[in-house]
Image (tube, rainbow, N blue to C red):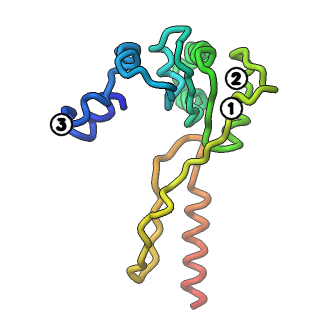
Amino acid sequence: MPRSSFEKVNRNPQTVQPLLYANEELRTFIHAHQPDVIVLQHWRLAHFLPDTLDIPLVIDFHGPLLIEIQFQENPILERLKCEKIQALQKADFFTCAGVKQKFYFLPWLMLAGFDLRQPIIEVIPVSLDPQLPQHISQGETTFVYGGLFLPWQDPVLGLTTLVECLDRQTRES
């Protein structure tokens, strides 16, 4: 886990220090731990790795960063396009959370030089522990919208439709 992420949550990194790394020290961290496979949660981390590795590298595509950057009108978009292709060229295999995501990432893999006729990317859905605690209703129904508002995912229509349906149901009861 990146040390910077952990320090934002926990003030005592000593308990898990051997499992933390700084991006700039990723090569040293990998060399010290000698993993059988490297799985990066984001393609940008590949920037910190050499162009060739003796260890298989898997990149897990989690989200469409470049779409996010474009909607944010961030001037680093053009630079990130090139960086993304260079990062993908370092990997041996890819995963993503859904079929629609896979279709988004396929052209990027082609631009990076991969033969899409080969099994180069697989969908691994985000999963939950099957032993989740049972929800016990406390009476009144409560709706919670979680996450954050992203420019290309406007939840307003769904949320206002929910409110309208609940209001209509209340009036009819």
**Above or below for 119 versus 115:** below
Q: Residues within 10 Å of mark 2 (few under 14, many from 20)?
A: some
Q: Residues within 10 Å of mark 1 (few under 14, many from 20)?
A: many
Q: CA distance from mark 3 to mark 2?
A: 40 Å
Q: Which residue is mark 1?
A: 121
Q: Which residue is mark 3?
A: 12
Classify the position of the N terminus by image quarter.
top left
Quick one: label 3 or label 2, which is nearer the N terminus?
3
Looking at the rendered image, the disc whose residue lies closer to the viewer, 1 or 2, is: 1
Helix, strand or loop under label 1: strand
Nearest to the observer: residue 25 or residue 84: 25
Q: CA distance from mark 1 to mark 3?
A: 37 Å
Contact, CB < 8 Å: mark 1 with mark 2? yes
Residue that extends furthest to the right in the rendered view of this protein: 117
Left or right of residue 132, residue 85 in this image: right
Q: Which residue is mark 2?
A: 109
**Residue plotted at (33% across, 24% down):** 21
Q: Quadrant of residue 120?
A: top right
Quick one: label 1 or label 3, which is nearer the N terminus?
3
**Residue plotted at (62% across, 21% down):** 92
Label drawn at residue 50: none
Helix, strand or loop under label 2: helix
Percent across and percent down for residue 17 are: 24, 30
Q: Mark 3 is on which residue type?
A: Asn
Percent across and percent down for residue 153 are: 59, 46
Quick one: label 1 or label 2, which is nearer the N terminus?
2
Residue that extends furthest to the top in the rendered view of this protein: 51
Nearest to the observer: residue 27 or residue 86: 27
